[in-house]
Amino acid sequence: MADMEYATLGNSGVEVSEVGFGAWVVGTDWWGDRTREDAIDMVQHALDQDVTFFDTGDVYGHGDSEEIIGEALAEHRDEVTVSTKIGYDFYNNPQAGHGELPKKVTPEWVHTAFDRSLDRLGMDHVELLMLHNANVDEVDEDVLEALDELREEGKVDAIGWALGPSIGWLAEGDAAVANEFDALQTVFNLFEQTPGQHFIDTIREQNADTSILARVPHSSGLLNEQVTPETELGKGDHRSHRPSEWYETGWEKVEEIRFLERDGARTMGQAAIQWLLYNDEVASVTPTFRTNADIDEWAGAPDTPPLSDEEYDRVQELYRDNFGIDRDDGMDALRSSVGGADLEETGMKSAGD
């Protein structure tokens, strides 16, 4: 078993393993079918590999993920950091495929939804509570006060804002930093650096204490090489929402960064995680574990050689040149849930992001 490293979320005192368990893979079939017993085994296997940060959400499986996490960790509660998310009203709205459900972010809903989450988890508190994909205009002073109330009641230790499902959300992340949220979760990886890199720059400029939680670190299967030219994605596979052009250009990009493997010292999947952890602002990375073998490999990433300054700078130079690829990757329509206006106003170009 490799040695795990740990970090603290902002100044909250909440400790997270640098590789966390994204619990959207249990309680749903978006990342493959598995029995409840298999799901619990995966969670416990991650714990055996010193993964101590478990990130779930009430909408995952409409509560099923929370119940699985609660059951799997019941005998290890004092050893782990648990995060959940609220912000969708799935109680009154059926799930239609992978479509986004109606959001609900009000002070009353913060209390109601969170209490229901605690019931499913079988816990009296969680270390981290995040607003799930909330738009910036939904998070007013009353909502912020409701979150503070939960902290004062001892029900949560840290507050976060999870951004998504696509990779715009610049105003939301900036608001999280400005309002001193402890954690900011966003899609962030070597191939998709906007707006994650912007948030790191903002945190540094403002000397803020917000920590980044990076999700989709393997760019939907490219950087762990689980989606190759031979892969056929099933209709229920969540990764199939990406256009074929995305993967076709991605395979070419992967070949440009083979140097990160260091002659076998790191797998590409481990290198992608180390690229994120190069930035001190990134407290934890939550890859999508599909098997125990994934857990073994990626939980071992912090024990591999960290990226050198030279390696990191070389990656960034390639990224700025879009890895030498001069054609559309088919992602423009998916780049921002807010229409991309906030990104354009900052002068951020879309190429490569």
Image (tube, rainbow, N blue to C red):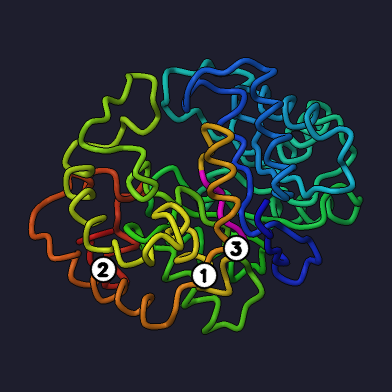
* Tag of residue 303: 3
Q: Residues within 10 Å of mark 3 (few under 14, many from 20)?
A: some
Which of the 4 quarters of the picture holds residue 120?
A: top right
Disc 1 or disc 2, which is closer to the eye?
Answer: 1
Which residue is outermost to the left? Answer: 326
Q: In this picture, is 328 found above or below 233?
A: below
Q: Where does the image place residue 329, in percent across and percent down from the top left? A: 17, 48
Mark 1 Cα shell of 10 Å, populated few (<14), some (14-19), many (≥20): some
Residue 319: assigned label: 2
Q: Which residues are magenta?
A: 283-287
Vertical placement of residue 208 versus 117, above or below: below
Quarter of the picture holding the C terminus = bottom left
Amino acid at circle 1: Pro
Please check the rendered image and state whether residue 129 is part of the magenta-colored stretch, yes or no. no
Q: Amino acid at mark 3?
A: Asp
Name which residue lies at 52% across and 45% down.
133
Labels 2 and 3: the sequence-earlier one: 3
Element type at mark 1? loop
Tell me which secondary structure the magenta stretch mostly adopts: strand
Q: Which secondary structure lies at badge 3?
A: helix
Please name the residue shown 75% across and 38% down the image. 108
On the picture, is 265 further left or further right than 258?
Answer: right
Marking on residue 305: 1
Helix, strand or loop at mark 2:
helix
Amino acid type of the residue tagged 2 in the rendering: Tyr
Where's residue 67, x and y in %? 74, 25
